[in-house]
Amino acid sequence: MVWADMSKLRADIAHHLGAASAGEIIRDGFKVVIAGAPNAGKSSLLNALARRDVAIVTEIAGTTRDVLQVDLDIDGYLIKLYDTAGLRDADDRVEIEGVRRARLALGDADLVLLLVDMTNPLIPDDLERTWAHVTVGTKKDLIDVVSGRYDLQISAATGDGLPELRQLIGNSVAARFSGLSMAIPSRQRHKDSLTKCLAALDTAITQKDVNLELRTEQLRIAAEYLGRITGRVDVEQLLGVIFSEFCIGK
């Protein structure tokens, strides 16, 4: 039956739109933000994962004043790794701006690596708990006994724990794609067209008391929006099938 097929099509399109965030990852990369208090080892970790000196590393708190970014390839996925200013109440105007930008980056992250210096474990008390994050204890080479709860312990200096951290990031990306078809919208115009197609389908399917001609007009609109993505859709053939199964006005 035509309307049963249209209902299935509506469900399929809704599913693909729901996977749009995965499409953005394909297009823009999986955003991993390194956060934590000053001197937690954020810049050292960025350099270690990038395998080059991207960020300046000193013992002076507040060295990082802006958001630094490098691209990584982990398990075939594009990972955009961001180093941010240490989260604290700063007095310096430049550092204040750096902290503000850090918080903006955190809000846009797909995954937050919350770094905690295990030799001086400080966690920003205003960290948004809604951010998806893992707690990473750093400077493992400088302590004898690990105290506190950490998802992972690492040492950027020795490389201890870095393979496990890369695997954790890769698993986080893979989990986002679990059970999803790769036929997902990766461009904004595709999402816009699918959204308008879905709205027209919904109107055609749900308004059962409306004249059939008006309902088929909504299907024509839906077909046009779908055709903008897939190529030409034969609207006349589609409407011909509908009118062959129903009497006009039913």
Image: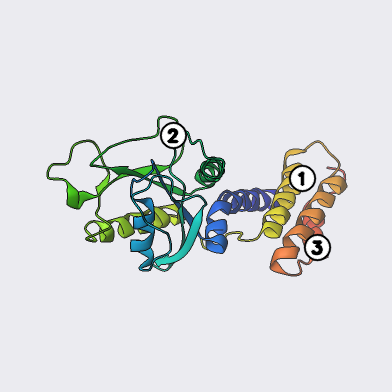
Towards the viewer: 134 or 88: 88
The residue that appears at 55% across and 52% down in the rendered structure is 21
Question: Which is closer to the viewer, label 2 or label 3?
Answer: 2
Give the percent coordinates (x, y) of residue 221: 81, 54
Towards the viewer: 108 or 91: 91
Q: Which mark is residue 235?
A: 3
Residue 210 quadrant: top right
The residue that appears at 24% across and 54% down in the rendered structure is 155
Give the residue number, with chain letter if any, for mark 1. Answer: 204
Q: Secondary structure at mark 1?
A: helix
The residue that appears at 51% across and 35% down in the rendered structure is 91
Give the residue number, with chain letter if any, for mark 2. Answer: 127
Q: Secondary structure at mark 3?
A: helix
Mark closer to the chain start, 1 or 2: 2
Q: Are marks 1 and 2 in contact (CB under 8 Å)?
A: no
- Residue type at tag 2: Leu
- Residue type at tag 1: Ala
Q: Report whether 231 appears left or right of 60.
A: right
Mark closer to the chain start, 3 or 1: 1
Q: Report whether 99 appears left or right of 11.
A: left
Q: Secondary structure at mark 2?
A: loop
Work out whether 78 lies above or below 84: below
Which quadrant holds the C terminus? top right
